[in-house]
Image (tube, rainbow, N blue to C red):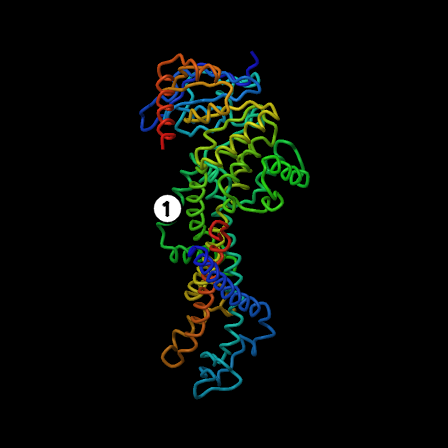
């Protein structure tokens, strides 16, 4: 098949005070072109570490010990920072978990978005500023002309996440890693943000790795789902099959708990 | 609802500080620039027959010498006015150079870490183990007196202030999410340091810089006091204090007036720095 990203047999772990604790134990993950691929797992399962490994922003104490992350014919796992900038950075973007801390607090929105465009799209300052307005318009921010001159703290969480989504899609990447992009937002905003990601994804044909612990969210937006449990992918299926006919015991438990939870919520 | 009013009050009080500090320093600046036109007398002209005359509000004063004269009959007011020149030149140049050196080393050490950080941090620790005034006296004694040696001495002593604070702040900023976001986008290290981290350190830096200008005024005064600043035929505040010290019982103003000048200048720099910190930081400006 036509995979954008192919993670093979990935092992990584943290070394601290001469103690090594494994996080991922041989993860295999294939993300197809133009799909939204869900990655589900409980807290501590290693979802974010997998995302960071793909994005090349693992903390210093964490190392990849074995395995490959194939992207466009090269291996991200063994890449230097320089090679990564040349080959991959432009094509893999991210939508972060916490929109509050993921924008530089002392720089204006327009300048932050503009910098990305100038780096990857080689636009000059004026063209970049025009493009920023279009991008903000695409993510349904009202009054982009005002927003470009604002600082992050002047925007609501939902607005900031829209800005970050605009940033993620700005350079037409092939893959976007969305690491729990709605966890920090309240429920009504969550829904809008999901709609927006889904809409932009179908317009651009970008692949998305959508990380979440919330099966409800996954069901709304994903084509394909992988379940990560204690450092291993225990199940990889299309979303429809997974919810109707889960194969793995852990997945079954997870679905059961979730349905209990929703029943409990709806009983109110 | 009380929060916005409170923050507005904070904002207003810092505005007042910036204005007060700025106006006082601006006045000193004008005095320094126009010293030859403002000063009623030649600051070096001696008149041994009119030594130790009192300022205008005391008995035994001469209307020609508003703030009295020193033991050699030189006009105190004119000497204070010319002393402003040295004080301000040292304050601005020495503080800026110390800030530049300390900031560059602090940013690099904080961001790159590793051996660079180890070297810089140890250097700062060793530096801070020396008593600063003694170190400056030794330095000036070795490199000779003069305006440039005073500046060099202050830079060499005080770069650690900037280095420590900037390094610590860089370490904090480096771990923020927006930095890993910038790394994943593919910005070069240098760009991240310059465009992402430095703007976050800047409010702190401006505060430190203005505070350091106040400190530089004091250090210059100390060096003048021990006779290791500019040549003795140039009027400086510290030099005036030193000369006045011998006559403090008979003519207290010769020593006290330059002290008052120093206090006012340092207070003004501190007020300016404090106010600027609050205003420059967009998060606090909220």
Q: Which quadrant of the figure contains the C terminus of chain A?
A: top left
- Residue at x 49% of width, y 24% of height: A54
Q: Is residue B153 left or right of residue A108?
A: left
Indicate the position of residue A240 as horizontal and vertical percent values: 48, 16
Judge by depth and name the residue closer to the eye, A239 or A227: A239
Judge by depth and name the residue closer to the eye, A66 or A168: A168
- Residue at x 57% of width, y 34% of height: A167
Indicate the position of residue B153 as horizontal and vertical percent values: 46, 55
Judge by depth and name the residue closer to the eye, B191 or A99: A99
Judge by depth and name the residue closer to the eye, B68 or A114: A114
Q: Is residue A85 left or right of residue A190?
A: right
Chain under disc 1 = B
Structural crowding at the residue carrying mark 1, measured as other residues with C-alpha within 10 Å and reported as few (<14), some (14–19) or many (≥20): few
Asked if residue A17 shows in the view, the reply is: yes
- Secondary structure found at label 1: helix
Asked if residue A43 shows in the view, the reply is: no
Q: Is B113 located above or below residue A239 in the figure? A: below
Pointer 1 residue:
B126
Indicate the position of residue A92 as horizontal and vertical percent values: 55, 26
Q: Is residue A108 left or right of residue A228?
A: right
Residue A242 location, quadrant:
top left
């Amino acid at each position: 098949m036509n995979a954008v990203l192919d993670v093979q047999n990935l092992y990584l772990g943290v070394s601290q005070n001469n103690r090594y604790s494994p996080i991922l134990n041989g993860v295999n993950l294939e993300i197809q072109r133009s799909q939204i691929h869900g990655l589900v797992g409980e807290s501590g399962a290693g979802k974010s570490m997998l995302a960071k490994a793909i994005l090349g922003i693992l903390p210093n104490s964490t190392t990849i010990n074995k395995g490959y992350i194939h992207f466009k014919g090269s291996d991200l796992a063994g890449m230097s920072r320089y090679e990564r900038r040349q080959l991959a950075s432009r094509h893999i973007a991210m939508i972060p978990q916490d929109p509050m801390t993921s924008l530089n607090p002392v720089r204006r929105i327009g300048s932050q978005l503009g910098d990305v465009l100038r780096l990857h799209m080689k636009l000059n300052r004026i063209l970049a500023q025009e493009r920023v307005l279009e991008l903000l318009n695409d993510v349904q921010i009202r009054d982009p002309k005002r927003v470009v001159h604002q600082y992050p703290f002047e925007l609501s969480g939902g607005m900031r996440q829209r800005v970050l989504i605009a940033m993620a899609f700005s350079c037409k990447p092939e893959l976007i890693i969305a690491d729990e992009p709605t966890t920090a937002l309240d429920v009504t905003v969550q829904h809008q943000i999901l709609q927006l990601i889904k809409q932009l994804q179908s317009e651009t044909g970008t692949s998305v790795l959508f990380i979440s612990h919330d099966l409800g969210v996954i069901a709304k937006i994903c084509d394909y789902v992988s379940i990560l449990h204690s450092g291993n992918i225990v199940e990889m299926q299309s979303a429809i099959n997974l919810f109707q006919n889960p194969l793995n015991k852990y997945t079954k438990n997870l679905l059961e708990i979730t349905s209990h939870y929703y029943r409990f919520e709806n009983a109110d | 609802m009380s929060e916005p009013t409170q923050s507005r009050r904070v904002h207003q009080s810092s505005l007042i500080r910036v204005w007060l500090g700025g106006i006082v320093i601006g006045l000193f600046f004008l005095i320094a620039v126009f010293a030859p036109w403002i000063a009623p007398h030649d600051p070096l002209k001696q008149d041994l027959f009119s030594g130790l005359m009192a300022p205008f509000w005391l008995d035994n004063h001469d209307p020609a010498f508003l703030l009295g004269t020193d033991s050699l009959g030189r006009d105190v007011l004119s000497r204070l006015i010319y002393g402003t020149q040295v004080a301000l030149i040292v304050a601005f140049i020495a503080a800026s150079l110390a800030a530049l050196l300390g900031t560059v080393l602090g940013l690099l050490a904080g961001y790159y870490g590793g051996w660079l950080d180890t070297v810089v941090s140890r250097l700062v620790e060793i530096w801070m183990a020396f008593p600063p005034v003694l170190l400056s006296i030794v330095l000036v004694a070795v490199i000779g007196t003069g305006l440039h040696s005073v500046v060099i001495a202050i830079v060499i002593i005080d770069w650690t202030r900037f280095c420590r604070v900037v390094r610590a702040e860089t370490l904090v900023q480096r771990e923020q999410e927006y930095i890993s976001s910038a790394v994943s986008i593919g910005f070069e290290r240098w760009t991240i340091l310059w465009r992402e981290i430095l703007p976050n350190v800047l409010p702190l830096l401006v505060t430190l810089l203005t505070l350091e200008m106040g400190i530089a005024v004091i250090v210059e005064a100390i060096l003048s006091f021990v006779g290791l600043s500019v040549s003795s035929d140039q009027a400086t505040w510290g030099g005036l204090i030193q000369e006045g010290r011998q006559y403090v019982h008979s003519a207290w103003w010769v020593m006290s007036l330059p002290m008052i000048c120093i206090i006012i200048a340092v207070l003004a720099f501190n007020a300016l720095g404090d106010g600027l910190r609050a205003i420059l930081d967009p998060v606090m400006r909220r």
